[in-house]
């Protein structure tokens, strides 16, 4: 399977130059627990405006917990998280959405008894700007033409790929500055995986910064400006997407090379 077209070099250089300033998202020394079990052991990462950043790692490494912690679903016990200079590590998830972050979780978690249109409208729950909501609905339906064809269909009757499109579209309806995507290619056919990653790239080119968790390291790093490698709740490697694709450790552990 061919990797999605890499990010363009001028944009990459522009983002690198921006990194001299303040990050959009700044995660410092986060420790997150499930009961007495420490899932994140002091991770730190930064995301700058306009980037696509990928977290890769084996199952159980802490990738999903990282996104859940950042979006407020599982608050950290220690450490700080700032979004555009404001701390959000003790802020409720719905308030984090209002501050410009949206999360498309692992497993899609759409409202199966609601129609496609109702699911998308739920994504705009924190907004009251009706004209702009209508514009964003049109944007989502342009990104995902299949959803336009199924607007009145129940979410639970969609295929796996269509449900993934709906989950991403619903997250976009809050008009996020930062979009968290958890395993968008999970369970999809190779053709649909290509489609999803092309859409991820398109969303970024339209101005949305993206933090991506993904098992498909080849595709994810191909569309990413930078990446982090996680092992057992810790960040063990950080580099550009292109350099991580060349890393011997990454190629052996995540690309299946001997």
Image (cartoon, helix red, strand yellow):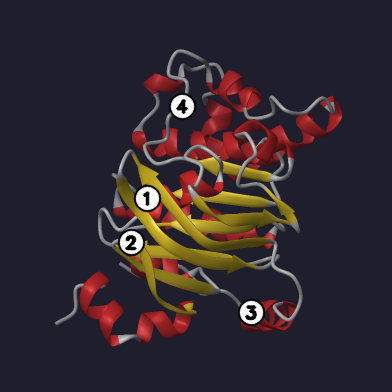
Mark sitting on residue 12: 3
Residue 120 image offset from top left, x and y in percent: 61, 27
**Residue in the foreground of this view, choosing between 171 and 136:** 171
Q: Looking at the figure, which quarter contains the N terminus? A: bottom left
Tags 1 and 2 in contact by the CB under 8 Å rule? yes
Q: Is residue 193 visible?
A: yes
Residue 251 image offset from top left, x and y in percent: 27, 79
Residue 214 lies in what quarter of the image? bottom left
Residue 97 lies in what quarter of the image? top right
Above-or-below relation of 240 to 221:
below
Question: Which comes before the other along the chain, label 3 or label 2?
Answer: 3
Q: Secondary structure at mark 3?
A: helix
**Which residue is labeled 2 in the image?**
216
Residue sitting at x 40%, y 80%: 244
Above-or-below relation of 43 to 131:
below
Residue sitting at x 54%, y 23%: 116
Question: Which comes before the other along the chain, label 4 or label 1?
Answer: 4
**Residue in the foreground of this view, choosing between 91 and 252:** 91
- The residues bearing labels 3 and 1 have C-alpha atoms spaced at a distance of 24 Å
């Amino acid at each position: 399977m061919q990797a999605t077209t890499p990010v363009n070099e001028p944009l990459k250089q522009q983002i690198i130059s921006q990194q001299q300033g303040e990050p959009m998202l700044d995660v410092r020394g986060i420790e997150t627990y499930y009961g007495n079990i420490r899932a994140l052991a002091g991770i730190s990462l930064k995301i700058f405006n306009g980037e696509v950043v990928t977290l890769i790692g084996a199952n159980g490494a802490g990738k999903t917990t990282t996104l859940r912690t950042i979006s407020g679903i599982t608050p950290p016990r220690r450490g700080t998280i700032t979004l555009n200079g404001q701390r959000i590590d003790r802020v409720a998830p719905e308030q984090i959405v209002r501050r410009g972050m949206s999360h498309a979780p692992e497993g899609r978690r759409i409202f199966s008894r609601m129609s496609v249109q109702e699911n998308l409208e739920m994504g705009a729950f924190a907004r009251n700007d009706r004209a702009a909501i209508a514009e964003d609905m049109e944007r989502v339906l342009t990104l995902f033409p299949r959803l336009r064809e199924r607007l009145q269909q129940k979410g639970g009757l969609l295929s796996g790929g269509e449900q993934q499109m709906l989950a991403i579209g619903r997250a976009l309806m809050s008009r996020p500055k930062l979009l968290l995507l958890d395993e968008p290619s999970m369970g999809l056919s190779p053709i649909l995986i290509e489609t999803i990653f092309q859409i991820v790239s398109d969303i970024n080119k339209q101005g949305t910064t993206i933090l991506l968790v993904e098992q498909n390291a080849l595709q994810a790093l191909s569309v990413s400006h930078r990446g982090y490698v996680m092992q057992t709740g810790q960040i063990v490697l950080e580099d550009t997407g292109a350099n991580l694709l060349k890393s011997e450790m990454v190629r052996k552990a995540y690309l299946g090379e001997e």
